[in-house]
Amino acid sequence: MKTNLLFKLLYFIGCGIAFLGIFFDFYSYDVFILGNIKLTSWSYNLFEGWNVNNTFEASFFATLNPFFFIIIVFLLLKYPPILSISPLFHIIFLGVIITSVLCLLFKGLEDSKNLSDLTFYAFLHIFLLLLVGFYTIVFPMFYLIPHNLYFPFTTIREPFLGITYHYFLGIGYFLEFIAFILLFPYAVFYLQTVRNYEISDESTQITEELINKANIRIDIDKLIAEEEFKFKFKTHMEGKRK
């Protein structure tokens, strides 16, 4: 029971972190020139997409030299690749988190006498775990890396132009990663408990059926009469043959 309560508490905390993480930036990259002069910074939010923050240094250097002006304009106009994830998906994710928390409050393992009734809720918790797994595993592998948005962080330098790119994951990703770790124990524990109960219940039913079959009363007199009839019939047939 203590293990159940501990896992349940971690699950609640994980749901809260997963809910908050969806609103923070998931990915960012900064562009520097001449080593340490930041020109621009891009950040990716799941609902808003890419946001840019141009620095004062970019405008200042653009006014000093036409060469810098061309490079800076090119960098500022270079829009990051569009990551085609519908905001509706994130809204559904938030809805699943809220539903899972409500089910956990009113459909806990300790509150039900028949655990077979909790199968739907067990799969709901696993579904939430899979959705968090999408943000922590599928998103980097299939949305970031194919677009040359390096994971989890890296630095790319172009010596000829003196440009440096810093790629790194945002706080939103790390919150979802922490949430996955916290959600995993109770989601698996909940499902495993329900499944073990169903298997045990099925085994009990089969055992009861076998016992009932074994306890069927046998009509001894009927069996004796049938055997006597077979014996007399056999004796009668053998007498005719002789």
Image (cartoon, grey):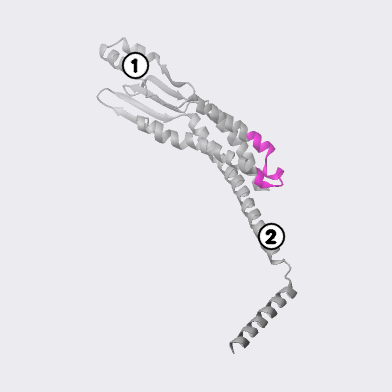
The residue under the point 28% across, 23% down is 162
- Between circles 2 and 1, the one closer to the viewer is 2
Q: Determine which quarter of the picture holds residue 16.
A: top right
Q: Determine which quarter of the picture holds residue 109.
A: top right
The answer to whether the residues at label 2 and label 1 have Cβ atoms under 8 Å apart is no
Above or below 235: residue 41: above
**Where the C terminus falls, by quadrant?**
bottom right
- Magenta: predominant secondary structure element? helix
Query: Is residue 152 something that shows in the picture?
Result: no
Q: Determine which quarter of the picture holds residue 69.
A: top left
The residue under the point 68% across, 64% down is 213
- Left or right of 125: which side holds 228? right
Mark 2 or mark 1: whose residue is earlier in sequence: 1
x, y (%) of residue 86?
47, 25
Residue denoted by label 2: 208
Residue 77, disc: 1
The local secondary structure at tag 1 comes to helix
x, y (%) of residue 72?
32, 16
* Magenta region, residue range: 101-117
Residue type, numbered disc 2: Glu
Above or below 83: residue 9: below
- Left or right of 137: which side holds 197? right
Q: Nearer the viewer, residue 53 or 219?
A: 219
Residue type, numbered disc 1: Leu
Pick out the residue farthest to the front.
240
- Left or right of 27: which side holds 73? left
The residue under the point 66% across, 54% down is 201
- How many C-alpha atoms fall within 10 Å of the one at disc 1: few (<14), some, or many (≥20)? few
